[in-house]
Image (cartoon, grey):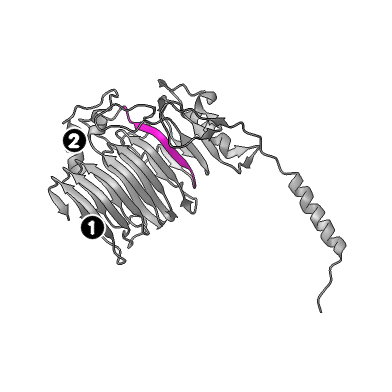
Amino acid sequence: MRKRIPIISFLFLFCCITTVRSQRPVPTTITWELATPQYPTPDAYVYAFNVKEMGAKGDGITDDTEAFQTALNKLKLINNVATRFGGTVFVPSGKYVIKGNLTIPKGVTLRGEWKKPVKGGPIEGTILMAYNGRDDATGTPLITLEPAAGFRDMAIWYPEQTADNIVPYPVSIRMGRNGIFGNNFCNVRNVTLVNSYCGIEIFDEQTAGCPVFYDIYGTPLSVGIEFDNIADVGRIDRVDFSPAYWSGSGLEGSPQIGGPHEQWIYENGTGIMMRRNDWSYTCYVNIEGYNTGFNAAPSTASPGSFPNGHNYELSFKNCKNAVKIDAISNAGILFSKIHIDDCDNGFV
């Protein structure tokens, strides 16, 4: 026999729930502003905060780390509750010294002003000057992206890195923060890696998915982009790595064309390092002057796992190895429309 509950009990419960909900803090209203970047963009976008409103100078001298993180955190917490709308923090053109590290919260995008670089030409727009982590390749990344975070329209430059004595630094951009399950849906677009030791890394012991990297340029020295333990489809689209980007950057201490950094990259550098992934797409990539253009290798995050995926319209020039295969998933891997010019080895 079913037990009947008086309707007054339901009314009492409804009133209690309504009262609890009404006592929750209401997020503060943000005044959104339409950005007017000095370089053409394919979209019109609004932002919540400008880092200069938080005290950033962008003068190439003052440490702006705290001002950046303050602006980012304001979109993470509003009246002590997680924001429901995320948003963009705008970084106007300038040179911003970052002597610490930055974490971009879930659903937040850090966006600057970016002019697509020309190989051998000057780097313009928003430039982050990174200093932390010298001689420590495994240290805290310059930029850490939480799930659904974004980093775009900026250049990253290490002023203390020299062409004749290249030393390790932590990775510039890392998708995923330790301890968060499902570090998914991160976006990195329109970024110039002037002279990062390691450019962009997706490495997650708990697995992550769906990273999107579009329009990545520059001279990463050791590794340009590395995927590992990706549990769902990612995309690397429109990438161009060459020693010439650092040489022609016009930034202080940049090497000459033909400088010692070129030989170092030829002996040590890898453009794309693809480890364990699930059917990621890598396309429209140009790698010039590296030891290895594309390396398919075993996972270091998930031992016994190997890469698969779709790779097409890849061009390699003046590399020691265009494509080096150390491991392949038994599901297979695709290479199509591969262009190889003046490389010592095509496929190894």
The three-letter code of the residue at mark 2 reads: Glu
Indicate the position of residue 108 as horizontal and vertical percent values: 52, 40
Q: Name the residue under label 2.
A: 262
Indicate the position of residue 319 as horizontal and vertical percent values: 17, 44
Residue beneath the point at 47% across and 51% down: 184
The one nearer the camera, 123 or 39, is: 39
Indicate the position of residue 287 as horizontal and vertical percent values: 24, 43
Disc 1 and disc 2: Cα gap in Å? Answer: 25 Å
Q: In this view, does 128 lie to the left or right of 53?
A: left
Residue beneath the point at 32% across and 58% down: 309
Indicate the quadrant where residue 120 lies: top left
In the rendered image, residue 25 lying in the magenta stretch gets the answer no
The three-letter code of the residue at mark 1 reads: Asp
Indicate the quadrant where residue 276 lies: bottom left
Quadrant of the frame with the C terminus = bottom left
In the rendered image, residue 155 lying in the magenta stretch gets the answer yes
Position of 47 relative to 284 (above/below): above
The stretch of residues the image draws in magenta is 148-159
> Secondary structure under badge 2?
helix
- Label disc, if present, on residue 326 of the rendered structure: 1
Q: Name the main secondary structure of what is drawn in magenta.
A: strand
The one nearer the camera, 309 or 229, is: 309
Quadrant of the frame with the N terminus = bottom right
